[in-house]
Amino acid sequence: MKSKITYYDWIPYFKAIAIKMFEISKDKSNRDSLLLNLANELFEEGTAILNFSITDPFSIIYSIAQKNTKNQRKYIFESIKAVCGLEENLPTDFTFPTPTPNTKSLFFFNGHYVDGEGIAIGNDCLWNLFHQVYNGEEINNDDFLKVLALKNVGVTKLTQAMFLINPNEYMPFDTQMNKLPVDSLDNLKLISLQIEEDGVLPYYDVLSILKSNFPGCYYYEINLLNYLLNTTTGEQLRVSNTYCQVSSNAQGQNEGDYFDDFVDKNGVYTGSAFLNEHTKYPLQDYKPGDVVLVRRGTKRLGGIGLIVNNEYLPNGYDDDLMIKIIWLVKDNRKIQSTALGQWDGFSHATANTVDRFKECYPETFKILDYTRNKQKTMVNHSAVKFKNLILQGPPGTGKTRLAKQIAEWLTDETSDKEKSILEAIENKMFSKEPEVEENPCVEVIQFHPSYTYDDFVRGVKVNVVDEKISYDVENKILGQMAFEAAKPENQDKAFVLIIDEINRANLNSVLGELIYALEYRGKMVNSMYKTEQGYGITIPHNLYVIGTMNTADRSVSHLDYAIRRRFTFIPVPVNDEVITNVESKKVFNVIRNIVKNNISPEFNVDDIQVGHSYFLVEGKDLYYKTKYEVIPLLNEYINDGILLPSAEDEIKELLSNNF
């Protein structure tokens, strides 16, 4: 974790704006004009919200959140600080819902508060709902449903704004929520539909589920925890199997209980570096992701947290330092079985202590176990260096099979991803037959000489409707997969495009500007065709491209250096060890000698040797494979000048001498 971040320091800024708007709301006759004045003070010229003569509290809050970019956040938070007279430092934590630049941030449409059918709704429902959210009051379902009915407003947008107004009481219901380790929230689409139809009650049910799984925690803590556990950036908090324990009697058993201070400061500490001159507290032994068990006595327990920053590292104890944590549970519970020993200070947690906590907080340990297992299989796609692979080798070495095995491994959310792709290939971690045909995250295509950019990336489609011709631009296989992989709900998934015989097409022509995008993932490039989303196209970090290439094909030379530099080439050689049948092995060796003894000096025998997959059969199947697949291949080698004419007689005698 980055020690310079003070988590939750964004909250006072949004709270200050909410207070300002709440005061404005008291003057019902002038509130709209007063809110417009506030908007003009907050936002710089050109911001969408300033283009209209109306506004509302939700549009203000959501427009502020949309400014959460590196280039805009400093201006907006300095503006809030000046307008509201805040003394707090500018925020360092920006982990709050942030609409993308393309998201419609306003809760009105073209200057009017209307529903999807264009029927006027007005903004009274927004002011009413703002009051209820700000005060944490029971939400009026009619107001809630009216706001949901507004054009360009949905469950995600509304609940994100509610969270920003009052993060103690509300949780954003967005695509991040299905990453929480809570079984009953695994079908977000269904719950979202229920909220749209029934209103606030299903949303309250979600809040209740979260509270029961994270007792005592505020929703802004749950939101941050969800981000830290599931982000694939360097900020990810990986849950370890290491436990420490700390007593809330930080200054000693007779000097008072500091649990409330632990909660207020989101950190734990002890009153001295030493329990006595013989026992040193192991303060520097614990790192981010380790689990902190908070005790309040021999039978009373206070809660559990995860370390996000150990301030005692690297210099050791100081009175002003602490171990910063994010809470999983803040709830006083009592051990019903054998009590723990009398103790204060800070130490390693024994197995007995862990077991007692597990008895008292079973839901929390379930979350810890689930998260450990999930993180073990997660891939930080932005950190993966080898996303564009070409598997190269002679015919019949299993290149396409290996490509499918890699794709299956990448997209399997239960497989161990502690090794990189190249390590997995070198360690031969793939053994079972791949089944990717029904996998929605994998596509397999084959290139051919007439394949073009319009077939692969984006092109014009001619449509005829009622004898009228129209020309529509549409994304093709690469554009479609890039669009799907880039969706927020898919950012942790791997998508794999397998291109069989990748060197048979003119790659410079087929890829076009995507040659650049394949290397610079996440960077937008402009296509020659414009879709509804514009000219831009981006290859996201989680889209992997695996090509196969036949090294016996002379068109290999068509791959220029620009293409080669953007791919990692992995040899897939002949492996006769997998041929277990004696007769099949004998025929393989005969053919290997024919190739070896008659190869043209221009070629490398490893590039054109007949692969082992032809010989994984026996009996009549071996005969037919040899007659109708291997011999035609060898004859083609002679025609292409790969084998010398001297091989002809040996090939003719191949069947009669071996079958």
Image (cartoon, grey):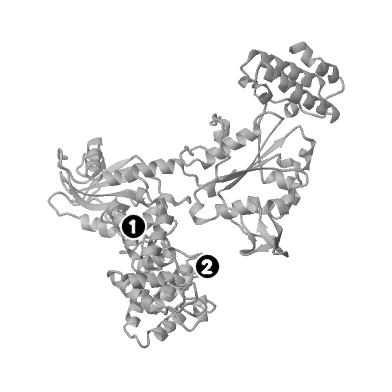
Q: Quadrant of residue 155?
A: bottom left
Q: Which secondary structure lies at badge 2?
A: loop
**Is residue 535 visible from the viewing direction of this image?**
yes
Residue nearest the observer in this picture, 377 or 266 = 377
> In the rendered structure, which amino acid carries the disc numbered 1?
Val
Estimate the x, y position of residue 110 in percent, counting from the top left: 52, 78
**Is residue 88 visible from the viewing direction of this image?**
no
Q: Residue at x 37, y 75 (%)?
A: 17
Q: Which mark is residue 515?
A: none
Q: Residue furthest right?
A: 645
Residue 460 in the image: above or below residue 336 = below
**Residue pointed to by mark 1:** 206
Estimate the x, y position of residue 545 in percent, counting from the top left: 62, 45
**Residue pointed to by mark 2:** 71
Q: Residues within 10 Å of mark 2 (few under 14, many from 20)?
A: few
Q: Residues within 10 Å of mark 1 (few under 14, many from 20)?
A: some
Residue 203 in the image: above or below residue 149 = above
Discs 2, 1 touching: Cβ within 8 Å: no
Q: Residue at x 37, y 52 (%)?
A: 185
Residue nearest the observer in this picture, 632 or 373 = 632
Estimate the x, y position of residue 439 in percent, counting from the top left: 55, 42
**First along the sequence among labels 2 and 1:** 2
